[in-house]
Amino acid sequence: MDAYRGFVMTLMAAEILKFDHLHEAFPDSAFWAFLAHHQSHVAWAGCSLHDLIQPSFSFLVGVALPYSVASRATQGHAFGKQFGRALRRSLILILLGIFLRSTHADQTNFTFEDTLTQIGLGYPLLFLLGHTNVRTTWIGFGLILFIYWLAFILYPAPGANFDYSAVGVPPDWPEHYTGLMAHFNKNSNLAWAFDTWFLNLFPRVKPFLFNGGGYATLSFIPTLGTMVLGLQAGRWLRSGITQQEILKRFLLAGIIGIVSGGLLHVLGICPVVKRIWTPAWVLFSGGWCFGLLALFYYVIDVKEKRNWAFPLVVVGMNSIAIYCLVHLIDSFIIKSLYTHFGHGPFLLFGSIFEPLLIGLVTLGIFYLILLWMYRRRLFIRI
């Protein structure tokens, strides 16, 4: 679990390598095109490796919950005390997400689509579902997805005269859908409408009209569904069943998730869109999360090949620390490297590769910080 978490956090930090710059420099290279694609989010529907970072992080929150609950129960913590801690953790995650999104702003940037904020908003409900039986949990999961989908469908789809340019979407954008899928079009759906009301309740430099990427506050509801999938995975891991049975369940859940999410998209019922975390996305990305967890579990726990994963464990055990480091001091590190060493060392392979080299050095510095913390048993937990 720590290795999987370290893998996704490394993918997040690796944005600093700027593969898109190299793709632009070598437009005919399939290698750089592949890396650039998987280091960026798809425009709307679909999925890249980069799109699996946030669902993986959310999924792993769910995986960890059964272990946390069991540990607290062993220590004699009553339900009320545990729930109070869950509420406190939720608040900290929400505030930390807002703080990190405000670091380069002129005033507090009240936005709630950040990964930490989304997890924080749904965490108390996840905690409550974690104290129910398996049947109730699956019923809750199904209701979350169905009610969220139905709410979008009941909200009026954009008409023929809808001014997409006013909400940052080109009128001829190829991702416009018709029929049921039109209810999930970018910046013209229920979640967008909610944010045009909700986000304007907070102090802002100018009124909120739309999110450029189409991200939305209400995505925390289906994100809860992703965390519930992780919760079930954590229960299987702690159930005492054989490793082969665990792998079988992970792989079966993965296949069901990917196929069902893809079918909802192909049949025109619900698109696979991460940016508004559609129910089809919950299933599709959740399937991939089960698959990735199965891979790490098979290699590390079943085959007991652990040494290779040590760097990932170092990162994964301090996921909050690396998340904050990337958001707070990446520019400071790069500026300091240029201040003390100049551009020369990073021009070894020419100016085209300069962002890649300085990004690699910056990643190395991040890792050394985390390694120092790991060896001194300094772990930032919320």
Image: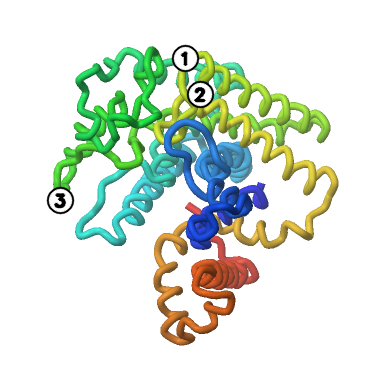
* 10 Å crowding of disc 1: few (<14), some (14-19), many (20+): some
CA gap, disc 2 to disc 3? Answer: 35 Å
Q: Which residue is mark 1?
A: 269
Image coords of residue 361 (percent x, y): 56, 73
Image coords of residue 328 (percent x, y): 40, 64
CB contact under 8 Å: marks 3 and 1: no
Quadrant of the image occupied by residue 158: top left
Image coords of residue 256 (percent x, y): 65, 22
Which amino acid is tagged 1?
Answer: Ile
* 10 Å crowding of disc 3: few (<14), some (14-19), many (20+): few
Image coords of residue 80 (percent x, y): 45, 36
Looking at the image, which is closer to me, 174 or 238? Answer: 174
Q: Which residue is mark 3?
A: 205
Total numbered circles: 3
Q: Is residue 65 positioned above or below 136 on the image?
A: below
Which residue, as the protein is rendered here, is positioned at the far right? Answer: 303
Residue at 56% x, 33% y: name it.
285
CB contact under 8 Å: marks 1 and 2: yes
Which amino acid is tagged 2?
Answer: Ala
Q: Which residue is mark 2?
A: 280
